[in-house]
Image (cartoon, rainbow, N blue to C red):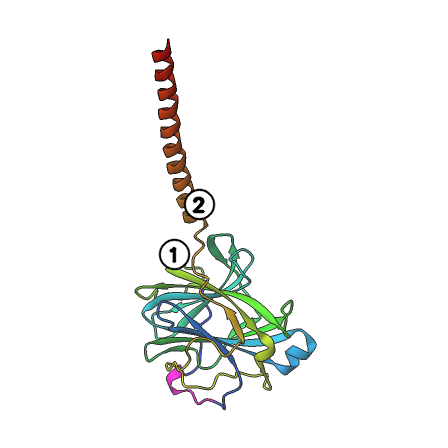
Amino acid sequence: MQGQTPSYEPSCVVARKTSAALVSYCDGGSNDICYSWGVPESTASSGSGKIFFQIEVPTDYQWVALGTGSGMDGSTMFIVYQDGSGNITLSTRMGHGHDMPEYSHMSAIKLLNGSGVCNKMMTANIQWGDLSGMDFAGSNAWISAWKRGSPMDSTDSRASFNEHDDTDSFSVNFAKATISSDSNPFTKAPGTQPKSGSTGDAVSGGGGGEDHTVAIHGIIMSVVFLIVAFAGMWIGFGVGKIAADRDVVL
């Protein structure tokens, strides 16, 4: 199965339009993975329709994923990696617990002009059409994950990939991402990355990181074991002393 790859000019030479008001957020190992969202006014007013979002990531990352919701289970995920010929593969997947998300063809998802690899940056400009069920007047939860390493160089949207280095979770206020245009709003030359952190108070949370529940549980159990062992030692010492005192009395 072939992934979604751009079929137009390389993103380095594409002429761009005037920038719109977008909400942006950056994370990653060095705050160097950035995402931007734009919600057309027509979508915001009707409660359904298309939205636009962009993923920008340095090429020293093997892959990056952006997904809806507060966790992997049930998340609609967008995974970006290099295709080996100067472009990118966009793999649309559905999350299932902590297992590798499964590829799912989504006809409403389109890669837009300006996507590709340029200046050691992967850029995915994405249109999601026919979207409903999100709060276009408020905040929506998103998750992300990433893995550094050598490029995957694959056009296979079903490709397997190595486990992530880290994860993040945050909320994006779509009310502050409204744009007047209903076409591709991404205008800056790809391969540049002026954004840092988040756009004002339009993004909240962040720094979610890994789910360390298992590790924390292990630490707690270790501490409990030490406490019980220590208490048992003193209880044993006390019982032994009482028995010795009784022997003396007898």
Who's the residue at 59% across and 75% down the image?
Answer: 174
Closest to the observer: 50 or 199?
199
Q: Which residue is situated farthest in the front direction here? A: 249
Q: Which residues are magenta?
A: 11-16
Residue 177: image location, x then y, percent: 56, 79
Relative to 118, is 106 above or below? above
Left/right of residue 132 with respect to residue 142 in the rendered view: right
User: Which of the 4 image quarters holds residue 228?
Assistant: top left
Who's the residue at 58% across and 68% down the image?
Answer: 140
Residue 31: image location, x then y, percent: 38, 72
Closest to the observer: 201 or 227?
227
Q: Which residue is mark 2?
A: 217
Closest to the observer: 233 or 135?
233
What type is the residue that disc 2 sits on? Answer: His
Relative to 12, is 234 above or below? above
Relative to 227, is 249 above or below? above
Q: Which circle marks residue 163 in the picture?
A: 1
Density class for disc 1 (Cα within 10 Å; few <14, some 14-19, many ≥20) is few
Residue 35: image location, x then y, percent: 46, 74
Q: Which circle marks residue 51 in the picture?
A: none
